[in-house]
Amino acid sequence: MEKKSQHVEPKQEEKEEPQASICGYDSLHRLLHDNLSPHLYQEVSRVLSGYNCGKAVEAIGLPESATGLSSQHGFDFLGFRFNAEKELLREPRVVRVGLIQNSIALPTTAHFVDQKKAIFEKLKPIIDAAGSSGVNILCLQEAWMMPFAFCTREKRWCEFAEPVDGESTQFLRSFALKYNMVIISPILERDINHGEVMWNTAVVIGNHGNIIGKHRKNHIPRVGDFNESTYYMEGNTGHPVFETAFGKIAINICYGRHHPLNWLAFGLNGAEIVFNPSATVGELSEPMWSIEARNAAIANSYFVASINRVGTETFPNPFTSGDGKPAHADFGHFYGSSYVSAPDASCTPSLSRHRDGLLITDMDLNLCRQVKDKWGFRMTSRYELYAETLAHYVKPDFEPQVISDPLLHKKSS
């Protein structure tokens, strides 16, 4: 028997860190659900989260084997379904996607070998829960195999870098084989064939345990603490779409979500699901978090799966941001809140802001074409005009197309 979707309360010994909750609630959805009447909550959710095929996004049953793991290990566990209209010429194309958000397992002062091993051990039961739930495609958070140390600007953290077929990939290949599951593994990559330079890379592991390919982060932030160019620069893999047994997928890593043309390029290459593994903190980006990925899903007629890590990671040596603030030893609170957006403007509730979590989402990929047919964004776009503007813009002698009022600068008599 399957049980209804549920979330698991934190263990008694867990202490909530500052900024972790919203007025004591795991997420905005839970705050609204517990404080509004059912009718008001329904209307608020309709506006905030949209309707899928004319009704709220459905919660799905989750197997007892997986809910047992979430209870035992204390991670948030939610499941939802996006439907599509029934078609006469195509069968439904339902794919089950899993997203994992997590905090690090040991303090950043622990031995690096122990830190990585502890993260592996921490993720095992969450990956097992995904596998036993029948997840087809699983995505982990940005640089999941290490603390997010990139903004400390200390070179010692480069030791966590590994080749595409390195330790993290080998660890995940066994799960891909065991559960017939595609796994997206964002790592700090060391490129052995090109002078051991590093990249922020997502490795795509096939459901047979093979490596399908990789994508390197296109856009590197230089915002506050998040100035990551000490470790890696802009990627060189373009906008690849990986055709898997379960659909065509792409990975828009973290900061790339702020660039609309980055989203567009994955769509032009045929993506049906775009994953956005991230590491971002509340003070910097939380008002953007619920908007950008959802807008990308709407504008490009594909699903977007957004993952953000949780917790506050404190480092041994204070660092500065170049923004005038005093030196500090952490970036702030990684607020989790992983969620999935659909091309019809609907989205799931999010996972917790402060707890490890697994979000499972069934999505009928037929919805992508149905939304394209309804709205006609691809048909009504003017790519030739955009291409012409961009071709001019990248030239040194570019001048903006601005028509000024001839009376604007005329002196009055």
Image: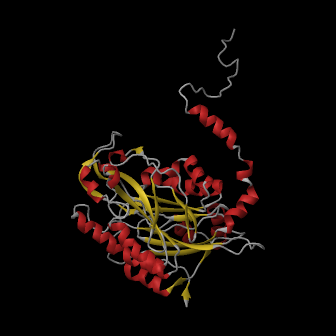
**Front-most of residues 269 and 136:** 269
**Front-most of residues 23 and 293:** 293
Q: Is residue 350 above or below residue 291?
A: below
Identify the image's colour scheme: rainbow, by chain, secondary structure or one colour: secondary structure
Q: Is residue 111 above or below residue 325?
A: below
Residue at left offset 36%, top offset 57%? 188
The picture quadrant where one finds residue 373 is: bottom right
Residue 8 visible in the displayed image:
no
Query: Please, which residue is most extreme toward the bottom here?
Result: 1
| Quadrant position of the C terminus in the picture | top right
| Residue 90: % across, % down | 73, 72
| Residue 348: % across, % down | 58, 67
Residue at left offset 68%, top offset 66%? 367
| Residue 2: % across, % down | 55, 87
Query: Please, which residue is most extreme toward the top here?
Result: 413
In the image, 209: left or right of 106?
right
| Quadrant position of the N terminus in the picture | bottom right
**Front-most of residues 261 and 223:** 261
Q: How many marks?
A: 0
| Residue 351: % across, % down | 49, 68
In the image, 162: left or right of 129?
left
**Front-most of residues 164 and 275:** 164
Q: Is residue 343 above or below residue 264?
A: below
The picture quadrant where one finds residue 310 is: bottom left
Residue 358 visible in the displayed image:
yes
Query: Please, which residue is most extreme toward the front here?
Result: 193
